[in-house]
Amino acid sequence: MTDTGRAPRALLFDVQGTATDFHSTVCGEAARISGGRHRGVDWAEFVGRWRAEYFTVLKSAKGDRDNWITVHSVYRDALARLLAEYGITDFSAPEREDLALAWQRLAPWPDVVPGLARLKDRFVLATLSNADVSAVVNISKRGRLPWDAVFAAEMAGVFKPDPVVYQMAARYLGLDPAEIMMVACHKYDIKAAGALGFQTAFVARPLEFGVHGQVDVSYDDEFDINARDFLDLADQLGC
Amino acid sequence: MTDTGRAPRALLFDVQGTATDFHSTVCGEAARISGGRHRGVDWAEFVGRWRAEYFTVLKSAKGDRDNWITVHSVYRDALARLLAEYGITDFSAPEREDLALAWQRLAPWPDVVPGLARLKDRFVLATLSNADVSAVVNISKRGRLPWDAVFAAEMAGVFKPDPVVYQMAARYLGLDPAEIMMVACHKYDIKAAGALGFQTAFVARPLEFGVHGQVDVSYDDEFDINARDFLDLADQLGC
């Protein structure tokens, strides 16, 4: 494990996709709120495009801590565009808000709570998410995710993979990057952390975009750990 | 409870003094590290003066998020001054560091873990501490304090009672101040929050400075709640 072979003292986790199954949650919430009104809509495709819009906005976002654009507003605005494009005109304003807030109700993957419970005895566990702090808090409380701390891009004023986000987490933990392992299913995320000296764990999430989604789940020696899920991660870290 | 009588959605807790017994912890650690070498030293007085030095430094601190002075360094520097003044010259460098880090090992008051467990079912629970983020994380992990989030002055770049600290917590929670209750045994802390529209809970900690300490434990109608401890707080909030 890493050049030094040292066990980490803290683990940082991506939330949307790595710890939680946004595809199932948001598709389910869309179908629930739609209530059978839009039977022709492919909600899996809809949610995939919604998530892609989020990435497009985040990539072009300029860091501005004092005029921070919440991720909730990013999802809300992207939803309005997509609903118009799909010709869905009968969602009321409260229904739109309810659906946008589905991103704050993401359900954890089945392995996450038992995996974190095992990891928590040995390591400090914290989030490092691009989602709003409030979203991470709401998701975590709903899913009973036992973090020791919640860190998010909002606290840094820039989004991952900006180095400032990872460096902020190390400073807040009072640890060197080499003592911290970044855990994510997105390779751009752990590669950015790895470039700064963090340890890295790739967790495969083949269903991130549903059963028909295209996801890179290939293991890579570049990462300190490649894991099937959080239970496998706990196994490999000796918990 | 408050003008509107609405129950809060989140509770923010002071940590050093309100949730944890720094006096007993730090006195005990000083005696342990001293190992009987300094039998004439009144460690209760020593710790009281150490804490007072911390307050003096924090009051004069200028907010500077990019050149943040850690509270650990404040305690460490104050310790060096006090040891010199007390004529204690035989503490090694590792012993001094160990003692300064006692502030990151503060034990919770006996009512805190059971009280928080009851409150956690109904409310979002977060810290709002002047201690370093790493200190709050270490204290919380050691004491198994079940926070939903850890917020600290370090994240705001200024210390309580600066309004920016409380406003940061409200923004991160995605709530209005009126939906949040600040809980502390220090009246300056809850008064500052109350002036910004937060609900307030005063928790009496008569032993904050030990059995001979001078502490203001008087209840005041100015606060939405006056409580004996966290169990009484849970009772009054209907948990």
Image (cartoon, coloured by chain):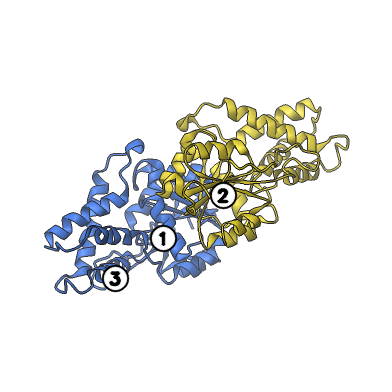
Chain colours: A blue, B yellow
Residue B103 versus residue B61 in the image, above or below: below
Residue A129 versus residue B197 in the image, above or below: below
Quadrant for the C terminus of chain A, please. Answer: bottom right
**Disc 1 sits on a residue from what chain?**
A
Q: Does the rendering let one see residue A190?
A: yes
Name the mark nearer the viewer: 3 or 2.
3
Residue at image position (71%, 40%) is B99
In the depicted view, which residue is nearer to us: A207 or A179? A207
Kindly identify which residue carries mark 1.
Answer: A139
Secondary element at image label 3:
helix
The crowding category of the residue bearing disc 1, from other C-alpha atoms within 10 Å (few below 14, some 14 to 19, many at least 20), is many
Image spot of residue B13 (x, y percent): 57, 47
In the drawing, what numbered circle is on residue B70?
Answer: none
In the depicted view, which residue is nearer to us: A150 or B228? B228
Amino acid type indicated by mark 1:
Ile
Kindly identify which residue carries mark 2.
Answer: B137
Amino acid type indicated by mark 3:
Gly
Secondary element at image label 2:
helix
Of callouts 3 and 1, the N-terminal one: 3
Secondary element at image label 1:
helix
Image quadrant where residue A182 sits: bottom left
Residue A118 versus residue B156 in the image, above or below: below
Image quadrant where residue B91 sits: top right
Disc 1 + disc 2, Cβ < 8 Å: no
Name the mark nearer the viewer: 1 or 2.
1
The crowding category of the residue bearing disc 3, from other C-alpha atoms within 10 Å (few below 14, some 14 to 19, many at least 20), is some
Q: Mark 3 and mark 2: span between their CA atoms? A: 35 Å
Residue at image position (86%, 42%) is B36
Image spot of residue A218 (x, y percent): 32, 65
Task: State whether discs 3 and 1 lie on one chain.
Answer: yes
Amino acid type indicated by mark 2:
Val
Kindly identify which residue carries mark 3.
Answer: A28
